[in-house]
Image (spheres, helix red, strand yellow):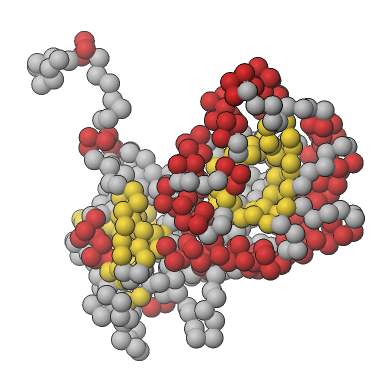
Amino acid sequence: MGSTHPAGVQNSGSKYLPQVSSKNTNISPNQQLLPLTTKINSHDHLEVGGCDITTLVQQFGTPLYILDEETLRTACRQYRDSFKHYYQGESQVLYASKALSCLAVCAIAALEGLGIDVVSGGELYTALSAGVSPDKIYLHGNNKSHEELILAIQSGITIVVDNWYELHTLVSMKSSVIGNMTGSNDPIRIMLRLTPGIECHTHEYIRTGHLDSKFGFDPNQLDELFSFVSKQSAINCVGLHAHIGSQIFERQPHRDLALVMVQWLSKAASLGNAMTELNVGGGLGIKYTESDDPPSIEEWVKPICEVIQEACAVLNMPLPKLLCEPGRSLIGTAGITAYTVGSSKVIPDIRTYVAVDGGMSDNPRPITYQSVYRPVIANQMSAPITETLTIAGKHCESGDILIKNAQMSKTKPGDILVVMATGAYNYSMASNYNRLPRPAAVVVANGEANLILRRETYQDLIKQDCLPERLKSKELGVSS
């Protein structure tokens, strides 16, 4: 299974394969369309992590999420090592687990020295259950529940406070609830999320840094905010956080953000808040199509480190502990999704639809964000590209289209269609629309595949359903 396709053969998959040369093996995963271990084997099949995709489908079924461990680990190491190389102070990379939260992914990130950024009690519980150290977990969110805040405080993690309501709630909780519950006198460890007002060119729904945003404190309130925080014994404010969005290719907005945040840190110090941490967020984009040209991980890290170090020197400030929280650029390229081709419909002079056994329930991004993906047929990688096809899902929804006007080889029922770069925000945003069970997920490495998410069953779908006694009847075939 580990052999590559015969040299010199032109095929529909070759232009998508990772461009690794003998001169440069340190390629950035986010700049590739497929996982780093991708090959075309002697059977003309797509292979990832030493595993033939058609064999995985036979074993685990479709739709199937497939995660390449080596690609994920490589991205983790590149972030971690780039900060160590370019930043003279302490640094900590956090995996933004909203991209894909499960025990295995959190464990892999932690094994590579990363912390975890969580945005809910569920993600927090997952990270803790995976064995991630609480001092490397940071909780975000603009409307954290009372229960989530209690879990966060009892776990000893850092809470990134988003607004005045949450700040006042934490102060009151420490004295009225948490102190009595735990008997601890330690202050609650927090950071403050600020809205920087920095625009970047990305989808409206994933821009979180401009002033008209539901996230973060208004920077016009800094004097009031820092003065309030400095007087509260219930909390220990260790730093500042900001985030300007995701799937960003521009570099200047992140340089601007780094400079602004150092200035805010200096202002906080002048008002009695000696903060020691700075979290510049994430947002580096990945390659979804041939035309996408994101910076490498190193190219993203280097200017941020330079700006912060230069600004701290000018302001005569000690270097803060520098944090960032990439998600998509860590795991997006590491994941692919395999489907089985089913029916087709030809509308002469208009369009040809080819349907697969999944769709908007396992990948809602095309219908939500108009996201564009690239497909290949995993069981015939050298077949010439001769068709323009629209890949449709199986849901009862006209908008359930995965890919419009895809350039592909000719397909037939039973073919295995693979969609690239689905590691981020596919499983994590998946639903049971039309009561479809969510797919299984496997992690592949060195020719071995391990299940990391079981495929849901019909029994799982009704597990939380409740049928009141008055609705049960023999006529309906339901007895007491």
Q: Quadrant of residue 383?
A: bottom left
Residue 416: x percent and y percent? 25, 63
What is the quadrant of the N terminus in the image?
Answer: bottom left
**Position of residue 391 in the picture relative to residue 413 (left or right):** right
User: Would residue 409 be visible to someone looking at this image?
Assistant: no
Residue 451: x percent and y percent? 31, 53
Q: Quadrant of residue 34?
A: bottom left
Give whichever of 378, 121 is nearer the camera: 121
Numbered label tally: 0
Give whichever of 413, 1 is nearer the camera: 1
What residue lies at 69% left-to-right and 49% top-to-bottom?
Answer: 279
Give whichever of 353, 437 is nearer the camera: 437
What residue lies at 12% left-to-right and 17% top-to-bottom?
Answer: 479
Residue 320: x percent and y percent? 77, 52
**Position of residue 154 in the picture relative to residue 197 (left or right):** left
**Compared with residue 132, is residue 410 higher up or lower down, i.e. above or below?**
below
What is the quadrant of the C terminus in the image?
Answer: top left
**Position of residue 121 in the picture relative to residue 303 (left or right):** left
